[in-house]
Image (spheres, rainbow, N blue to C red):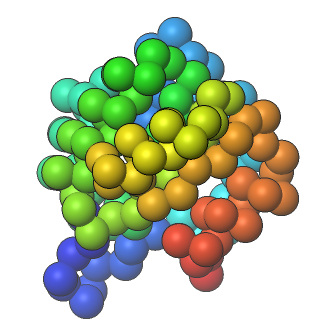
Amino acid sequence: MVSADPNIKVHTLLLVTRPVSDPHAILPLIAQKDRSILVAEDVIRIQDLCQTHPEIGLVMISMELAVEYGMATIEKTHMLIPEVPIVVISKYVTLETIRLATMMGCDEIMQSPVDRSTLNAVIEKYLPGN
């Protein structure tokens, strides 16, 4: 969550994927700069990381998964850290998906496959590197 404490540097990206997904497909595309990356595969891990890492400044959710699970993940994450932007990466971007994701707390949706420059531009938009 974005901390009210000015001494906490917001520099961490939380990447959420399905257990059967390979987060390493996205990780090599992300420019490291001065930021950390945490990976979560389920809502329990998301909750744990959100509570123990106040430096999280951006959440990226890979929705290469069932739409219902993806929407529930967006909603739960937004409830845990409402002030942190959520970006969804999905192969299945439809007007309905955009509408639902926005209602659940998503700030931006990217259609996959996504290239390195586009991905890093969006990360930089929400979580500027130092």
- At a point 83% along the width and 46% down the height, the residue shown is 115
- At a point 20% along the width and 28% down the height, the residue shown is 44
Give the quarter of the figure containing the C terminus. bottom right
Residue 74 versus residue 59: which sits nearer the camera? Answer: 74
Residue 2 percent location from the top left of the image: 27, 71
In this rendering, would 76 be left or right of 90?
left
- In the rendered image, is residue 38 in sight? no
- In the rendered image, is residue 92 in sight? yes
The image shows a total of numbered marks equal to: 0
Residue 27 versus residue 16: which sits nearer the camera? Answer: 16
Residue 122 versus residue 93: which sits nearer the camera? Answer: 93
In this rendering, would 79 be left or right of 2?
left
Task: Give the farthest residue toward the bottom.
Answer: 6
Give the quarter of the figure containing the N terminus. bottom left
- At a point 77% along the width and 43% down the height, the residue shown is 114
Residue 86 percent location from the top left of the image: 43, 55
In this rendering, would 8 be left or right of 91?
left
Asked if residue 46 is positioned above or below residue 126 in the image, the reply reads: above
Q: Quadrant of residue 16?
A: top left
- At a point 50% along the width and 18% down the height, the residue shown is 65
Asked if residue 18 is positioned above or below residue 102 in the image, the reply reads: above
Asked if residue 59 is positioned above or below residue 82 in the image, the reply reads: above
Residue 127 versus residue 71: which sits nearer the camera? Answer: 71
